[in-house]
């Protein structure tokens, strides 16, 4: 770590640290005398600009230990100690944190099949842990999106390279710790010391040993780096991942839930939804999107709350106005508790607390689901009044010049201020008396920070100076003096000013201590107000964009009438977006094969079904005319050609690996979106793999997930004839004089052409290439037609068999080894033979 030593008004770094600081921050590199004939590199930064420079160092991957002076300068050595270590996951400075986003430190460890995971937000006190399968914990990294990840050294060596793939490309600092830090005995001891033995027993009964070990590692790390924030961690929450709908990293990225491909929230689902008016609400909305609920009762409670706000437009508007006056209560009360809050932050806290009674009055007639949230909103009139009595309305940023504590709060402070005020009058009186006594009409009594108080006499009048004047400073045109009386006054004033600063700081600390006694209630209030902000915001979005309340049911169906893509419709001129219906059911329409040319809207259609399903699982209303959404445990979206060349993984390998993960993880409650499978290899390889995937999803009794399968393999549409739960749909396209007109309407049936050459023309491919492609396409189609005519077959697919149906059945049965068939393969074969037999009659 880089070590910064406080030396007066500067933080200084030496030796290699100085070289790094100079290089990274563009500072002047100098040297410092460290003994006989020894000089070492030195670089420094003013204390007032520490936060700015810390931000740059943390962003570039450094960790910084702050070594501060523990006593004012005096005789002898000044005591110093490391007061905190700043790391990417433990930032507390408001200027370095994104106000509307959480900033997490995470910890995890992996064993054979299970893993433990914990995370903490040091500015809000959120602390949680879970134990799950290895794959689930890897995916939890995506959900939490930590800035820093603690991991055992042994795991870092074998698995550390995987982390970037699960943090969606964000730079998450990897911090390996000794394996002993994650030991079960060490973690239990730390948790017991922090929360108490009784609390530890409760944790052990609700979370696994691996979760406890991950949480213990976080406490150990915070003890070393940010011991002051430990007081703010008053509870550890156990949670289970099976309670939430899961999205893997690729699905989150491709659906553009939190950020668009451009890397910003604009153009993402979050960008559409986040009309929150408080930082707590914005962070809570992100949490709801990260942890969509599967509990029907909890979802319906959220829907009831959104419905009420939707109907109560006036109350919703007034509530949002009041909420908009709130400071970031979660983070401010955390800084108060840890002793790092500024006077301005405490004043903002007091103003926010005074808003709470108005909020409660507005929601006096709220329905039960909202009243349960309001139970955590605790009025803090006493605390608000205490702050109002103690602090001025617009306090300075520091105690250097005083003026933080309000007059009348402390008699001693008022007396000292009166002394200073009278001292200013005394100086004016002294100046008048000395002019009269000396006869020097230009005599002035003044003050500066370097020389203190002085009597200034111009050079022509120096001969009039009385003998009791003591020379203090010589200027070009004047001399400065002091008298015993002025020196005594200076001592009194200096003592008063120093005492005022000390007393104001002490009174402020006492005030923060009294406020901190209510931190649990204020934190609970802040979290409840954040949820109210989210619910009111979802109602506001529903009102603005015409969303409807979906039915969320336990059945394995998704039925959407007039569904719209929530993001695309916002970037489309009003009334131009084409809504579409969807019917998915594991009983009769389990797999929809969607065909149509590029640019026709296949990907938009797939994504809007996924996003509508996701919105329903956070309690939001959805962009549709009507929607029934069966509870979904996972949403998968396989799209595009990505590779990991540095890991030796080609785009097709990545495609197959992701497909394998989906097939091995999906259940009958999952929603799978395949956007072009098998296009990364040869036509027949890809077609064979795509068909095998569809057959597996249709026939496997455990999987049997709801599937949208967009493809250019038109041969796959024949599966509708042999697999009863496969349905064909296509996107309407009109061709007028060689020009395509996309209608974006999804209708039953299959597309007859891919229109690839026409789309290439629209994309601006050079005209000679387009013309040559048209010639080659006609030649290939003619050749395929001649082959089919020669075999006596009437078919479209190059993958169909050339033998007659009965001979084909006999051939396949002759070469069949029944003992080697799995139940799924046998069922698939039966469907195939039935299709072949049906085609001959």
Image (cartoon, helix red, strand yellow):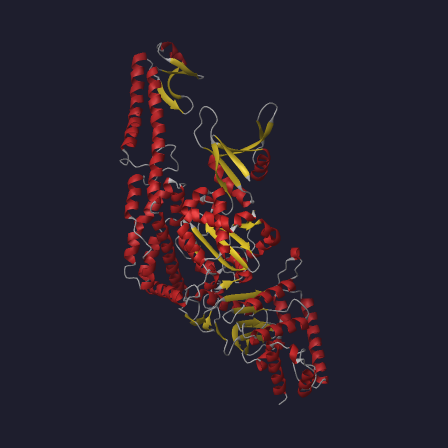
Q: Is residue 739 left or right of residue 624?
A: right
| Residue 373 lies in quadrant | bottom left
Q: Is residue 301 above or below residue 457?
A: below
Residue 193 location (% of width, % of height): 43, 46
Residue 638 location (% of width, % of height): 57, 66
Work out whether residue 172 can be spotted.
no
Residue 165 location (% of width, % of height): 58, 56
Work out whether residue 311 can be spotted.
yes
In the depicted view, which residue is nearer to us: 47 or 824?
824
Q: Is residue 411 above or below residue 532?
A: above
Q: Is residue 268 above or below residue 698?
A: above
In the depicted view, which residue is nearer to us: 221 or 161?
221
Residue 196 location (% of width, % of height): 40, 49
What is the tally of numbered marks visible in this picture? 0
The quarter in which the N terminus is drawn is: top right
| Residue 311 lies in quadrant | bottom left
In the depicted view, which residue is nearer to us: 46 or 832?
832
Q: Is residue 68 left or right of residue 797?
A: left
The quarter in which the C terminus is drawn is: bottom right
**Residue projecting furthest to the bottom:** 841
């Amino acid at each position: 770590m880089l070590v910064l030593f406080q030396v007066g008004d500067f933080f200084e770094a030496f030796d290699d640290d100085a070289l790094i600081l100079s290089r990274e921050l563009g500072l002047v590199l100098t040297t410092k005398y460290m003994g006989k004939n020894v000089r070492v590199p030195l670089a420094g930064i003013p204390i007032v600009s520490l936060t700015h420079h810390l931000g740059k160092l943390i962003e570039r991957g450094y960790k910084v230990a702050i070594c501060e002076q523990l006593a004012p300068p005096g005789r002898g050595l000044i005591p110093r100690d490391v007061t905190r270590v700043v790391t990417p996951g433990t930032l507390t400075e408001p200027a370095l944190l994104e106000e509307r986003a959480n900033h997490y430190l995470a910890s995890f460890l992996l064993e054979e099949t299970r893993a433990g995971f914990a995370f903490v937000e040091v500015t809000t006190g959120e602390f949680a842990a879970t134990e799950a399968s290895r794959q689930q914990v890897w995916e939890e990294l995506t959900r939490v999106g930590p800035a820093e990840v603690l991991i055992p050294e042994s795991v870092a060596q074998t698995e550390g390279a995987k982390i970037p793939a699960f943090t969606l490309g964000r730079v998450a600092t990897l911090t390996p710790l000794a394996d002993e830090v994650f030991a079960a005995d060490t973690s239990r001891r730390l948790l017991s010391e922090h929360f108490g033995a009784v609390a530890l027993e409760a944790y052990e009964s609700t979370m696994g040993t691996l979760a406890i070990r991950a949480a213990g590692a976080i406490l150990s790390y915070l003890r070393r780096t940010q011991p002051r924030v430990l007081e703010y961690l008053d509870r550890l929450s156990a949670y289970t991942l099976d309670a939430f709908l899961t999205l893997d990293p690729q699905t989150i990225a491709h659906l553009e839930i939190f950020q668009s491909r451009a890397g910003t929230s604009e153009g993402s689902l979050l960008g559409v939804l986040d009309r929150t008016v408080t930082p707590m609400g914005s962070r809570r909305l992100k949490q709801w999107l990260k942890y969509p609920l599967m509990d029907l009762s909890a979802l319906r409670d959220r829907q009831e709350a959104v419905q009420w706000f939707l109907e109560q437009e006036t109350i919703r508007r007034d509530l949002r106005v009041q909420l908009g006056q709130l400071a970031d209560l979660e983070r401010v009360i955390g800084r108060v508790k840890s002793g790092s809050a500024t006077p301005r932050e405490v004043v903002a806290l007091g103003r926010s607390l005074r808003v709470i009674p108005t909020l409660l009055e507005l929601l006096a007639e709220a329905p039960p689901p909202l009243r349960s949230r309001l139970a955590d909103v605790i009025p803090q009139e006493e605390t608000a009044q205490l702050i109002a009595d103690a602090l001025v309305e617009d306090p300075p940023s520091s105690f250097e010049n005083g003026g933080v504590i309000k007059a009348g709060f402390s008699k001693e402070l008022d007396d000292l201020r009166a002394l200073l005020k009278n001292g200013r009058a005394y100086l004016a009186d002294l100046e008048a008396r000395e002019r009269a006594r000396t006869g020097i009409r230009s005599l002035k009594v003044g003050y500066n920070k370097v020389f203190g108080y002085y009597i200034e006499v111009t050079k022509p009048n120096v001969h009039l100076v009385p003998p009791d004047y003591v020379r203090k400073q010589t200027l070009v045109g004047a001399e400065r003096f002091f008298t015993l009386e002025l020196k005594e006054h200076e001592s009194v004033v200096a003592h008063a000013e120093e005492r005022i600063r000390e007393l104001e700081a002490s009174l402020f600390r006492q005030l923060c201590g009294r406020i901190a006694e209510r931190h649990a209630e204020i934190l609970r209030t802040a979290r409840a107000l954040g949820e109210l902000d989210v619910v009111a915001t979802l109602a506001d979005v529903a009102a603005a964009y015409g969303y409807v309340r979906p039915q969320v049911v336990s059945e394995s169906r998704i039925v959407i009438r007039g569904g719209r893509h929530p993001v695309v419709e916002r970037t489309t001129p009003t009334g131009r977006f084409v809504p579409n219906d969807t019917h998915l059911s594991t009983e009769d329409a389990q797999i929809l094969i969607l065909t149509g040319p590029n640019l026709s809207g296949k990907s938009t259609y797939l994504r809007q079904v996924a996003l509508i399903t996701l919105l329903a699982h956070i309690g939001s209303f959805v962009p549709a005319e009507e929607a029934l959404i069966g509870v979904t445990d996972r949403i998968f979206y396989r799209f595009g050609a990505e590779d990991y060349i540095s890991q030796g993984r080609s785009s097709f390998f990545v495609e197959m690996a992701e497909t394998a993960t989906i097939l091995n993880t999906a259940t009958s409650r999952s929603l799978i979106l395949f956007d072009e499978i098998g296009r990364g290899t040869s036509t027949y390889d890809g077609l064979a793999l795509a068909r095998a995937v569809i057959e597996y999803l249709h026939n496997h009794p455990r999987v049997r997930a709801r599937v949208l399968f967009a493809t250019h393999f038109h041969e796959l549409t024949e599966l509708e004839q042999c697999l009863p739960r496969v349905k064909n749909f296509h996107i309407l396209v009109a061709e007028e004089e060689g020009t395509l007109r996309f209608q974006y309407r999804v209708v039953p049936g299959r597309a007859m052409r891919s229109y690839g050459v026409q789309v290439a023309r629209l994309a601006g491919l050079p005209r000679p290439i387009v013309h040559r492609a048209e010639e080659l396409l006609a030649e290939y189609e003619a050749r395929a037609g001649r082959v089919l005519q020669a075999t006596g077959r009437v078919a479209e697919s190059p993958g169909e068999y050339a033998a007659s149906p009965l001979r084909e059945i006999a051939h396949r049965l002759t070469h069949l080894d029944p003992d080697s068939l799995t139940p799924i393969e046998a069922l698939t074969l039966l469907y195939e033979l039935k299709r072949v037999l049906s085609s001959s009659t």
